[in-house]
Image: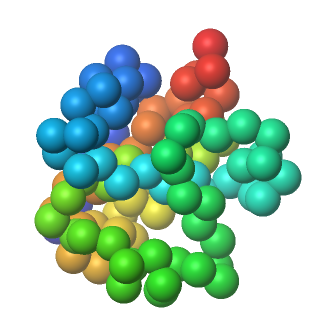
Amino acid sequence: MSFTRINKQQARAMIESSADNGLQIADVRDERSFENGHIEGATHLHNGNIREFIEASEPHKPLLIYCYHGNMSQGAAAYFAEQGFSEAYSLDGGFEDWQS
Protein backbone atom coordinates (compact mmCIF):
# COMPACT_ATOMS: atom_id res chain seq x y z
CA MET A 1 0.00 0.00 0.00
CA SER A 2 1.14 3.54 -0.67
CA PHE A 3 -0.09 7.09 -0.36
CA THR A 4 -0.71 9.89 -2.84
CA ARG A 5 0.60 13.45 -2.67
CA ILE A 6 -2.00 16.07 -3.63
CA ASN A 7 -1.97 19.85 -3.94
CA LYS A 8 -4.34 22.25 -2.20
CA GLN A 9 -6.69 22.49 -5.19
CA GLN A 10 -7.11 18.70 -5.22
CA ALA A 11 -7.60 18.72 -1.44
CA ARG A 12 -10.24 21.44 -1.67
CA ALA A 13 -12.08 19.41 -4.32
CA MET A 14 -11.96 16.35 -2.05
CA ILE A 15 -13.32 18.36 0.86
CA GLU A 16 -16.11 19.85 -1.28
CA SER A 17 -17.22 16.35 -2.22
CA SER A 18 -16.63 14.93 1.26
CA ALA A 19 -20.33 14.29 1.81
CA ASP A 20 -20.09 11.82 -1.04
CA ASN A 21 -16.77 10.17 -0.19
CA GLY A 22 -16.68 10.25 3.64
CA LEU A 23 -13.33 12.05 3.72
CA GLN A 24 -11.40 11.87 6.99
CA ILE A 25 -8.93 14.69 7.72
CA ALA A 26 -5.95 14.46 10.08
CA ASP A 27 -3.69 17.28 11.29
CA VAL A 28 -0.28 16.08 12.52
CA ARG A 29 1.04 19.47 13.67
CA ASP A 30 1.58 20.38 17.32
CA GLU A 31 -1.40 21.17 19.55
CA ARG A 32 -0.83 24.93 19.66
CA SER A 33 -0.70 25.15 15.86
CA PHE A 34 -3.89 23.10 15.62
CA GLU A 35 -5.62 25.37 18.13
CA ASN A 36 -4.53 28.47 16.19
CA GLY A 37 -6.15 27.19 13.01
CA HIS A 38 -6.84 24.02 11.10
CA ILE A 39 -8.86 22.65 8.20
CA GLU A 40 -12.49 22.38 9.23
CA GLY A 41 -13.38 18.88 10.35
CA ALA A 42 -9.76 17.86 10.98
CA THR A 43 -8.78 15.62 13.87
CA HIS A 44 -5.59 16.57 15.70
CA LEU A 45 -3.36 13.49 15.77
CA HIS A 46 -0.50 12.96 18.19
CA ASN A 47 1.29 9.97 19.65
CA GLY A 48 -1.34 9.62 22.37
CA ASN A 49 -4.36 9.20 20.09
CA ILE A 50 -3.13 7.53 16.89
CA ARG A 51 -4.23 4.00 17.90
CA GLU A 52 -7.65 5.30 18.97
CA PHE A 53 -7.99 7.18 15.67
CA ILE A 54 -7.12 4.06 13.66
CA GLU A 55 -9.63 1.96 15.59
CA ALA A 56 -12.41 4.55 15.19
CA SER A 57 -11.74 5.32 11.52
CA GLU A 58 -12.99 3.66 8.40
CA PRO A 59 -9.90 2.53 6.45
CA HIS A 60 -11.85 2.13 3.21
CA LYS A 61 -12.67 5.86 3.17
CA PRO A 62 -10.15 8.49 2.02
CA LEU A 63 -7.82 10.03 4.60
CA LEU A 64 -6.24 13.45 4.00
CA ILE A 65 -3.23 14.18 6.21
CA TYR A 66 -1.45 17.51 6.54
CA CYS A 67 1.31 19.09 8.59
CA TYR A 68 3.14 22.42 8.41
CA HIS A 69 4.76 22.25 4.97
CA GLY A 70 3.91 18.79 3.61
CA ASN A 71 6.96 16.85 4.77
CA MET A 72 5.87 15.11 7.99
CA SER A 73 2.49 14.31 6.45
CA GLN A 74 4.17 12.13 3.84
CA GLY A 75 5.56 9.85 6.55
CA ALA A 76 2.22 9.85 8.34
CA ALA A 77 0.35 9.02 5.12
CA ALA A 78 2.76 6.14 4.45
CA TYR A 79 2.17 4.87 7.99
CA PHE A 80 -1.61 4.96 7.61
CA ALA A 81 -1.36 3.21 4.25
CA GLU A 82 0.63 0.46 6.00
CA GLN A 83 -2.15 0.27 8.60
CA GLY A 84 -4.65 -0.62 5.87
CA PHE A 85 -6.01 2.77 4.79
CA SER A 86 -6.72 2.26 1.10
CA GLU A 87 -6.70 5.97 0.20
CA ALA A 88 -4.13 7.97 2.17
CA TYR A 89 -3.30 11.46 0.88
CA SER A 90 -0.58 13.89 1.93
CA LEU A 91 -1.18 17.61 1.35
CA ASP A 92 1.80 19.11 -0.49
CA GLY A 93 2.75 22.47 1.02
CA GLY A 94 0.88 21.62 4.21
CA PHE A 95 -1.25 24.04 6.18
CA GLU A 96 1.01 26.95 5.23
CA ASP A 97 0.15 26.51 1.56
CA TRP A 98 -3.50 25.77 2.39
CA GLN A 99 -3.87 29.20 3.99
CA SER A 100 -2.38 31.11 1.06
According to the image, what is the colour scheme of the structure?
A: rainbow
Nearer to the camera, 4 or 62: 62
Q: Which residue lies furthest to the front in this view?
A: 19
Task: Work out whether residue 60 or residue 74 is closer to the camera in this orientation and state it.
Answer: 60
Q: Which residue is drawn at 56% across and 37% down?
A: 39
The image quadrant of residue 78 is: bottom left
100 or 15, which lies in front?
A: 15
- Is 17 left, or right, of 89 in this rendering? left
The x and y percentages for residue 45 are: 59, 66
Q: Please provide percent x and percent y for residue 75.
A: 46, 61
Camera-nearest residue between 74 and 86: 86
Residue at 52 percent of width and 50 percent of height? 42
| Quarter that holds the N terminus | bottom left
Q: Is residue 10 visible?
A: no
Residue 19 image position (x, y, % from top left): 24, 40
Q: Is residue 89 above or below residue 61?
A: above
Q: How many labels does the image show?
A: 0
Q: Is residue 16 visible?
A: yes
Quadrant into which the C terminus falls: top right
Figure quadrant of residue 3: bottom left
Residue 59: image x %, image y %?
22, 70
- Left-right relation of 49 to 79: right
- Residue at image position (48%, 84%) is 52
